[in-house]
Each structure stands twice: as structure tokens, then as C-alpha cells.
Image: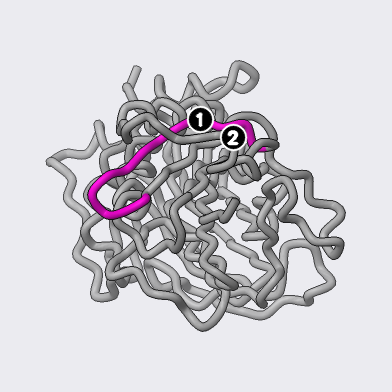
Amino acid sequence: MSPLFLAAAVDTVVAPYHDQIYVHEWGAVVYRRDVVEAAGDAGGPWVDYSQTMAEAPVIYIYGPEFTGDLTVRSQGDIVNAYPEPDESFRIDESVAGGASAVRWNSISTECPYLVEQPWMHSPAEETIAGFDWATRMWRQTESLIINRESDSFSDMFLYYETSFEPGSFPLPLPGSISDGHPQVIPVSGEVLVLFRPDMDWMGLGLVDADDLDELGNGIEITGEYSSELALETVTDWAEGELKEPEIRAMWGTWEPYALYGDWEGQYLVIFPVPYAMIPRISTLELTSESGLPVEYHRFFLGLAPVEP
């Protein structure tokens, strides 16, 4: 049995590994002043944008080889995708799933362990601005190779960005949700808090989300930053949705922003975006010619500077 198929099998105890396709997606929602971004990569240099952006991150596919289509629908405006989609179209805002969509048609997949020669991604003409330094990490997975015959595209992931109207993606921390979003359930349990009093020292601690208003006034972050603690915590949050290499790639992509990014103030809160909020970013739909069932696993980190 191929190691890839074994990896897919551990995602579920319900469907046999050879009869199920798995789609995994990870990213981060970044809050900067009045600007919110959901991104796969912190980029650099880090600057504010004029509108809310969702650079929805990295999509992987696991399971048996197949040929099919993948559609992304967003409540916002999808403005970029990798590779260039075969279709880009508007949809009715009253329809669940959003106001714009892109579709990759007739993509085919290959198990990387069964290719005749060592696989290398095809150098596509288009690039992902600010993402080149991270893409090597993104390819360190056991996911299927994604091919498209029309332009000889071949890579381990797909990617897209979308922009939103201001205020459409509220900060789900206790005390931060306005009356206009009563349906949003705030984050509960422990969150990571980075403390950066200056650029010479960084602290890290676990704080109950309900106690964030006590930072600096009853709750002090005294422990020095630990990459191991941060990755262990993020892994605890995401391991039910993502594989270990995906989690490492996600945190390896976002740790530089946490340490050196342009977030303002002294405290940065890192938390798991509530699963019920992820469809606000986008919805994914994969269909195969063989009609195989598809299971979706999606996880987003939230990163928000807070003032006690």
C-alpha cells in the first residue's frame, strides 16, 4: 500500500481510504487596525492594505488519483488565484457561498510515490506575490500532485485571495464582537499571547480568552518566547483537521510575522478561528469524474493585536 494512501486513511475511520477524497486547507486571519486579512503567508515587508483581504491559503488533496474540478466561492471578491483559474464568475450574493467564484477545470492528480521519475513542480509564469520564500515548506507534504494538461501546471497545492467589505469578518474574542454580529460565538479556552515590550525581548504565555482584558493588570507574560510551545499549542488546535507537515508549514509561515511583523502595541493574541466562521471566508467544492465522496478539513489561525 502506498504511504500516501496510508496517510489518507488516518483522516477518517468511516470511509475506506481508496473510496474517499480529502481536501485540506490552512491559513490565517490577520487583524490590523480596521484591516482584516486571511492569508497563507505573512509576506514581507508587512504593510497595511486599503481593504479587507482574504488571501486564503494553501489547498491540498489526498486520496486516490482522479480527474475533476475544484470550485471556490466567496462572500467577497476573489482577486487572485494560483494557478490562473479556468473560470472566474460572479454569483448571486443571496446564494449561500458568496458573491464571486473561481473554478479549476479538469485537474488530474498523481500519487508522488508512483511517478516514474522524481517530481518537480512546473515553474508557472504567474507567481504568488510575497509567498515565494514559503512555498518550499508548503510542498513538504504527502499530498497528491495536482496537474492541469492545458498549461502543463504541476504543483502540490492550489491558492487564492479574496477581498471583503470592512467589518464583514468580526474579531471573535470575548468583548470584541459588536452588536451587529450576535451570531458569532467567541473563542473560549486558552489562547497564545505574545508580549513584545520592545524589539529586544519577546515573551509568550497561555491565557484564558475570557481573561484577556487582564493583560498587564493582573496577568503578566513573564516566560520567554518558545517556538516549541507555540508549535505544540497550534498543533493541539489543528491536529484534528490537518496533518503534521501541514501544521509545521503553517506555523513556519506565520512565526516570522508573530516575531517581527508590523502589528501594533505590545500584545498579539493567536487563536483558532471558530470553525463556524470559516465559511465566511469561502466554501470549497471538489467534484470528480468518478463521483467519489469528498471530505473537507479546514483550519485558520487568528492573529490580533490587543490593548488591555
Number of labels in the image equals 2
User: At 48% from the left edge and 46% from the top edge, which residue is drawn?
Assistant: 26
Viewer-proximal residue, 223 or 184? 223
Mark 2 lies on residue: 218
Quadrant where the N terminus sits is top left
Marker disc for residue 80: none
Query: Which segment did they paint magenta?
Result: 197-209
The image position of residue 267, as x and y in percent, is 47, 50
Q: Which comes sooner in the sequence, label 2 or label 1?
A: 1
* SS class, disc 2: loop
Residue 198 in magenta? yes
Q: Is residue 159 left or right of residue 240?
A: left
Residue 277 in magenta? no
Amino acid type of the residue that numbered disc 2 sits on in the rendered structure: Gly
> 10 Å neighbourhood of mark 1: few (<14), some, or many (≥20)?
some
Against 125, residue 96 (above or below) is above
> 10 Å neighbourhood of mark 2: few (<14), some, or many (≥20)?
few
Q: Could you tell me how far apart the alpha carbons at marks 2 and 1 are, in whole angstroms?
A: 14 Å
Amino acid type of the residue that numbered disc 1 sits on in the rendered structure: Leu
Against 60, residue 219 (above or below) is above
Mark 1 lies on residue: 206
Asked if one can make out residue 207 in the rendered structure from this viewpoint, the answer is: yes
Disc nearest the viewer among 2 and 1: 2
Contact (Cβ within 8 Å) of mark 2 with mark 1: no
